[in-house]
Amino acid sequence: PTASSNAQVVNEPIVVKAGETFDGAGKTFTAGNALGDGGQSEDQKPLFILEDGAQLKNVVIGDNGADGIHTRGDAKLENVHWTDVGEDALTMKGAGNVEIKDSSAKGAADKIFQLNAPGSLTIDNFKADDFGKLVRTNGGQQGDWDINLNNVTATNGKHALVQSDSTTVNVNANNVETENVKGMYKLPESASLSIQ
Ligand code: DGU
Ligand code: CA
Ligand code: CA
Ligand code: CA
Ligand code: CA
């Protein structure tokens, strides 16, 4: 999908409440200046905040991706497309299990998925193109993360597919195809990595 020119401008994060579903019906959402400019400054705000158990589907995040999506616990995303990732695409801000399927992201100067709280990230049927890192657990942080990549196509990655400093991280990759991705799995020796 491509971003639509009549995107809905988001000037205040849209909060999807605990257990609720937000269905964007395929609409494009883009950040207004109040959220940030989509560059690499760290003080930007997300377009969406998903509270524990929230679901987000059928959403395109367009030209100004600002700080993307924040999750605060468990979350499910389906058919969500970032056409030009901002500072990053999605951040786990609260511990939980986050599942993302039938989705894509491109144009990430740095990271796509930023994991700042422990839990699991499972992505299934995902396309990533033109990015720094597909998944990064917070720099220097220890934590129990399970990262599951299923049916992923990643192209043109500058730094890594998955990077973590946590000695207890588990990464499972199942049917992951890459082209021109540098670094691949950058993990401590004690991490567990299974590739199928
Ligand atoms: O210590 O936590 O880049 O969530 C550094 C910060 C940094 C985060 C991260 C993010 O890792 O700000 O975008
Ligand atoms: Ca960042
Ligand atoms: Ca970008
Ligand atoms: Ca960020
Ligand atoms: Ca960054």
Image (spheres, rainbow, N blue to C red):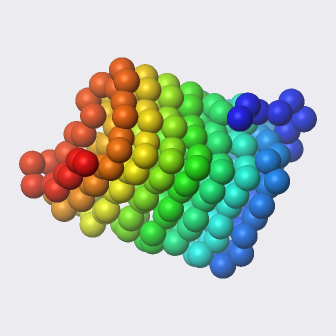
Locate residue 36, reporting x and y percent: 68, 39
- Relative to 130, does residue 60 appear above or below in the rendering? below
Q: Which residue is drawn at 86% across and 30% down?
A: 5
Observer-nearest of 152 and 189: 152
- Relative to 54, does residue 110 appear above or below in the rendering? above
Locate residue 78, reporting x and y percent: 63, 56
User: As drawn, is 125 to the left or to the right of 120?
Assistant: right
Question: Which residue, as the protein is rendered here, is positioned at the far left?
Answer: 189
- Relative to 38, does residue 158 appear above or below in the rendering? above
Question: Which residue, as the protein is rendered here, is positioned at the far bottom?
Answer: 19
Observer-nearest of 5 and 94: 5
How many numbered markers are drawn?
A: 0
- Relative to 83, does residue 125 appear above or below in the rendering? below
**Res. 92 visible in picture:** yes
Locate residue 185, reporting x and y percent: 24, 40
Q: Residue at x 82, y 53 (%)?
A: 25
Q: Which residue is drawn at 53% across and 56% down?
A: 100
Locate residue 121, reporting x and y percent: 42, 59
Observer-nearest of 141 and 188: 188
User: As drawn, is 15 to the left or to the right of 75?
Assistant: right
User: As drawn, is 23 to the left or to the right of 136?
Assistant: right
**Res. 110 visible in picture:** no
Examine the image and state in which quarter residue 117 appears: bottom left
Q: Which residue is drawn at 24% across and 59% down?
A: 170
Quarter occupied by the N terminus: top right
